[in-house]
Image (cartoon, grey):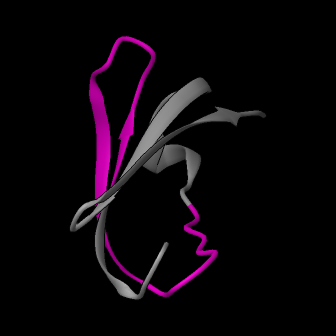
Amino acid sequence: MPSAAKATLSVYNVTGQLVTVRKVDATKGLNSETFTREELGVGGVLYYTLESGDFTATKKMIIVE
């Protein structure tokens, strides 16, 4: 995060369907969030988008067993 702010973290599956959304109070710099397999309900490749004000970042994550 470029600065501390409230942010929205959205997780999508490979077809673009929304899996979960989480509101976070992010700090400047590196932040982390932990999801359980039950929360996500799927494995494999997922994408997440972090949005806060003018800042938006989309990245890929891999869920392994």
Please tell me which residue lies in front, 38 or 7. 7
Residue ID at (48%, 33%): 47
Residue 42 position in % (x across, y down): 51, 28
23 in the magenta segment: yes
Classify residue 9 by image quadrant.
Answer: bottom left
Please tell me which residue lies in front, 8 or 52. 52
55 in the magenta segment: no
| Residue with the most extreme left position | 53
Please tell me which residue lies in front, 59 or 39. 59
Residue 39 position in % (x across, y down): 43, 49
Quarter holding the C terminus? top right
Task: Give the tally of numbered discs.
Answer: 0
- Viewed as shown, does residue 57 lie left or right of 35? left
Whether residue 37 is situated above or below residue 5 in the rendered picture: above
- Viewed as shown, does residue 6 lie left or right of 42? left
- Viewed as shown, does residue 54 lie left or right of 19? left
Residue ID at (52%, 85%): 28
Residue ID at (57%, 45%): 37
Whether residue 56 is situated above or below residue 7 in the rendered picture: above
Residue 44 position in % (x across, y down): 64, 22
Q: Which residues are magenta?
A: 9-34
Residue ID at (31%, 46%): 20
Whether residue 14 is situated above or below residue 21 in the rendered picture: above
Classify residue 36 by image quadrant.
Answer: bottom right
| Residue with the most extreme top position | 15
